[in-house]
Image: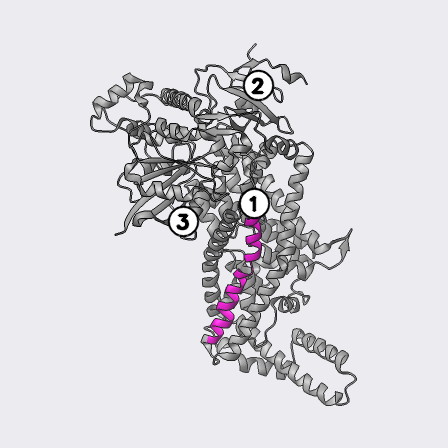
């Protein structure tokens, strides 16, 4: 018979809790959110000896049960609520052998909640290097628990954890300490008012809001006749409790845990001297950043080209294989081009998450925080804002969530508000396509103009973020104590498994999340673009044929035919049957031009054509036409939709498989009769995408994290106005 | 004159004194920043702030403003003059 039990993994940050979780659950894991909040919830299944099936929950890292952040309050609320469906049958506290002392603080607190608790001492492979010896059996006895000595790196001790979990019924539930000794008078009064409640649980409930108040939570009012202590008094009591617990722990470790300092050797001191050095430290950071950008823009272009070709071929194949009709068109032009537009991001996103995971896992990220804190402070930011700003180059959504460990609310809010300025990967396809259209291919000091333009755009993103942070720092009147604390973990070689899991998980959630929006929009666009309500749309074919007979081909088509003939002349001049075939080829080109003109006429008179026309007056001063107008409208949902929108707009009704870029290059601005994508309009577009807030998902996440519509709306208004003005000015100056 | 963690030089150590105020965040205490514990200055960031300390075996970075709140008694060490 199988039994199902709930297991909660709890531990300090940087103890390798996630490695243990990965080892226990393997690929049987799923990552989601706790209902209503954006704290990540990781759960998985693990098969244990004796037919027990464990549902394992990896709780957010916490130093204690004294709540100071949203992540920590998730842990406390779960442990205090027996009715929660995830309430653990057994708590597994993960500790790190080097920091055992402070890890035990959390352990004793959980033990005092009378939950069956076992202790995992992780990173045991470092013991000999650090000269650490532990008397395990004595430690088990003193802490009244069972211990598993584990090294996830060397894959040791995982079976022991499984055995201990399966045997959870034999774990003691006696508390380690009696916290009420810190104030017998106060706890005595508590007991008389609530005779049926567990005192330590009560204490945790009372003190939950002392250091952290979730905005939407009412202060806890225990009872009318119970006189509560002031926040300051409660804080003093928390201090007393911490000191009391450490006394208990120190006494135990004195007998059971020895460190021979002469044997201890580590990378920390040497590496720190270089990595936090005033010259080499910044130099290293700069080189790492360069490497990341190199990977994103250079290395990832190979898989991206490959994906691009596959999708182009796929679309062609579908059109040739399936019977002609609306459904085939929908699949080939709406759905497939939409999916292609998102799949092409995978290499870049994966590279970015790979680097961020490597930097986090190795412990280097904390050194960056340390190096950058003083530099960021004049802008109202913290050293911890650097991680979100770097993550923002992948995607603003995880970046906004990564601000959670910023201790001061003002610094955190500013970071959240300015992060969307950093160049996220959704802007990349827009940048890449426009840059290749309007920026010449030459080189300057060995660097391509196009690469320089891209770099400039990234710098401008950071610049805009820093500039607006400075502005917000002046304007926002928020009183918040400027507190900052960053743990500097020891350096570790990143574990392949952890890094791989993170990269796959983050990439997957990005692609699925953004993919849904893009797919939906592509289909809607396809529909709006291939249907219309006016007479003009119905009779497009006749109207266009009539027009060509009367006025000849449009300037666009004439240019198209001319280039075609020139190319043909170059390659076929030597052939004997040249004249005949030239005539035939000319006819073919004219036929093609006719089809294109019909398609373009149809599009112009479709639903979407009218929408674009409606906003044309607004975007004309920026050098855009109604087609770009459409793309601007749709990309308010998500920037990357710009490219797939143009893909859809241009391929609607067009039989030939042409890459979007070539189609864009051939576009003529109807007003100026010059190419639509020229230097002025191109730069104006680049600037617009650099600064505008075009991402519904980011707005949603900012709303969640700040718990108010005020901030995302402010963000939307500020960024969009800024973007509009800048690109308007740029076009007017450059045209 | 009162000596605080902010006064330490690289490699210098001190013992945290009793304090009665509640200015220090609870997190710092949880990491071992408690009266009687030893604190060592490991490194100072390039612009003199923040500072990187080892307190009770925990390696943490804090700002100078916070370090000024932690009073200590210096540990005189013969080896620190090399």
Q: Nearer the viewer, mark 3 or mark 1?
A: 3
Query: A602 or A465, which is in the foreground?
Result: A465
The magenta stretch spans which residues? A328-356
* Residue lying at 55% horizontally and 19% vertically, measured from the top left: B5
Where residue A336 appears, as percent x and y from the top left, is 50, 68
The residue tagged 3 is A25
How has the structure been colored for display?
one colour
Report the magenta stretch's main SS.
helix
Q: Is residue A182 above or below residue A455?
A: above
Q: Quadrant of the C terminus of chain A?
A: bottom right
Query: A95 or A733, which is in the foreground?
Result: A95
Q: Residues within 10 Å of mark 1 (few under 14, many from 20)?
A: many
Q: Residues within 10 Å of mark 3 (few under 14, many from 20)?
A: some
Q: Is residue A279 magenta?
A: no
The residue tagged 1 is A358
The residue tagged 2 is B13
Query: Which quadrant of the figure has residue A37?
Result: top left
Where residue A117 appears, as percent x and y from the top left, is 34, 35
Chain of the residue displaying label 2: B
Q: Residues within 10 Å of mark 2 (few under 14, many from 20)?
A: many
**CB atoms of marks 3 and 1 within 8 Å:** no
CA gap, disc 2 and disc 1: 33 Å
Relative placement, left or right, of A347 versus A55 is: right
Q: Are marks 3 and 2 on the same chain?
A: no
């Amino acid at each position: 018979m199988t039994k199902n039990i709930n297991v909660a993994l709890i531990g300090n940050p940087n103890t390798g809790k996630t490695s243990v979780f990965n080892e226990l659950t393997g690929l049987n894991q799923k990552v989601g959110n706790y209902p209503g909040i954006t704290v990540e919830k990781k759960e998985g299944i693990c098969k244990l000896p004796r037919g027990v099936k464990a549902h394992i929950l990896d709780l957010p890292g916490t130093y204690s049960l004294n709540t100071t952040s949203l992540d920590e309050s998730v842990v406390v609320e779960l442990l205090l609520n027996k009715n929660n469906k995830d309430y653990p049958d057994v708590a597994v506290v993960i500790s790190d052998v080097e920091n055992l002392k402070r890890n035990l603080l959390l352990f004793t607190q959980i033990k005092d909640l009378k939950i069956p608790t076992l202790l995992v001492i992780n990173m045991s492979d470092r013991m000999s290097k650090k000269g650490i010896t532990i008397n395990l059996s004595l430690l088990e006895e003193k802490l009244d628990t069972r211990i598993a000595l584990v090294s996830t790196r060397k894959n040791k001790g995982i079976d022991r954890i499984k055995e201990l979990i399966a045997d959870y019924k034999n774990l003691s539930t006696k508390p380690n300490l009696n916290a009420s000794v810190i104030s017998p008078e106060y706890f005595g009064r508590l007991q008389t008012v609530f005779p049926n409640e567990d005192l330590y649980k009560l204490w945790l409930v009372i003190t939950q809001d002392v250091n952290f108040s979730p905005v939407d939570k009412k202060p806890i009012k225990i009872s009318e006749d119970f006189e509560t202590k002031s926040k300051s008094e409660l804080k003093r009591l928390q201090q007393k409790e911490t000191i009391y617990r450490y006394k208990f722990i120190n006494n135990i470790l004195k007998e059971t845990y020895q460190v021979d300092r002469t044997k201890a050797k580590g990378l920390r001191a040497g590496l720190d001297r270089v990595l936090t050095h005033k010259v080499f430290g910044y130099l290293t950071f700069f080189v790492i950043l360069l490497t990341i950008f190199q990977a994103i823009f250079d290395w990832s272009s190979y898989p991206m080209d490959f994906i691009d070709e596959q999708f182009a071929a796929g679309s062609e194949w579908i059109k040739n294989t399936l019977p002609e009709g609306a459904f085939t068109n929908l699949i080939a032009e709406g759905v497939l081009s939409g999916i292609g537009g998102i799949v092409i991001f995978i290499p870049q996103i994966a590279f970015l998450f790979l680097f961020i995971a490597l930097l986090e896992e190795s412990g280097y990220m904390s050194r960056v925080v340390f190096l950058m804190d003083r530099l960021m402070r004049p802008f109202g930011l913290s050293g911890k804002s650097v991680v979100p700003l770097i993550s923002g180059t992948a995607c603003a959504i995880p970046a906004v969530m990564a601000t959670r460990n910023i201790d001061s609310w003002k610094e955190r809010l500013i970071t959240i508000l300015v992060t969307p300025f950093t160049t996220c990967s959704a802007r990349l396809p827009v940048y890449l396509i426009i840059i290749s259209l309007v920026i010449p291919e030459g080189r300057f000091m060995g660097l391509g103009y196009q690469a320089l333009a891209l770099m400039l755009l990234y710098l401008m993103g950071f610049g805009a973020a820093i500039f607006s942070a400075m502005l917000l720092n002046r304007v926002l009147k928020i009183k918040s104590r400027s507190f900052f604390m960053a743990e500097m973990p020891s350096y570790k070689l990143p574990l392949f498994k952890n890094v791989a899991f993170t990269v796959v998980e983050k990439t997957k959630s990005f692609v699925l999340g953004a993919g849904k929006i893009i797919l939906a929009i592509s289909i809607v666009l396809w529909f709006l673009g291939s249907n219309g309500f006016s007479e003009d749309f119905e009779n497009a074919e006749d109207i266009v044929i009539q027009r060509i007979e009367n006025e000849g081909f449009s300037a666009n088509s004439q240019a198209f035919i001319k280039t075609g003939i020139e190319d043909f002349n170059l390659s076929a001049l030597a052939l004997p049957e040249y004249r005949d075939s030239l005539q035939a080829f000319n006819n073919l080109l004219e036929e093609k031009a006719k089809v294109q003109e019909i398609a373009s006429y149809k599009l112009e008179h479709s639903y979407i054509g009218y929408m674009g026309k409606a906003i044309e007056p607004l975007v004309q001063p920026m050098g855009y036409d109604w087609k770009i107008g459409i793309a601007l409208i749709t990309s308010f949902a998500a920037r990357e939709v710009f490219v797939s929108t143009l893909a859809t707009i241009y391929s609607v009704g067009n039989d030939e498989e042409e890459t979007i870029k070539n189609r864009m290059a051939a576009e003529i601005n109807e007003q100026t009769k010059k190419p639509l994508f020229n230097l002025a309009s191109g730069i104006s577009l680049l600037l617009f995408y650099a600064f505008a807030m075009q991402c519904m998902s980011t707005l949603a996440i900012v709303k969640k994290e700040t718990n108010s519509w005020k901030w995302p709306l402010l963000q939307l208004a500020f960024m969009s106005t800024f973007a509009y003005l800048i690109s308007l000015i740029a076009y007017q100056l450059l045209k | 004159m009162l000596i605080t963690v902010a006064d330490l030089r690289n490699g210098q150590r001190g013992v945290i004194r009793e304090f009665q105020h509640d200015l220090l965040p609870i997190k710092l205490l949880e990491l071992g920043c408690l009266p009687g514990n030893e604190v060592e200055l490991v490194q100072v960031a390039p612009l003199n702030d923040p500072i990187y300390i080892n307190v009770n075996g925990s390696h943490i970075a804090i700002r100078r403003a916070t370090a000024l709140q932690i009073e200590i008694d210096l540990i005189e060490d013969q080896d620190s003059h090399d």
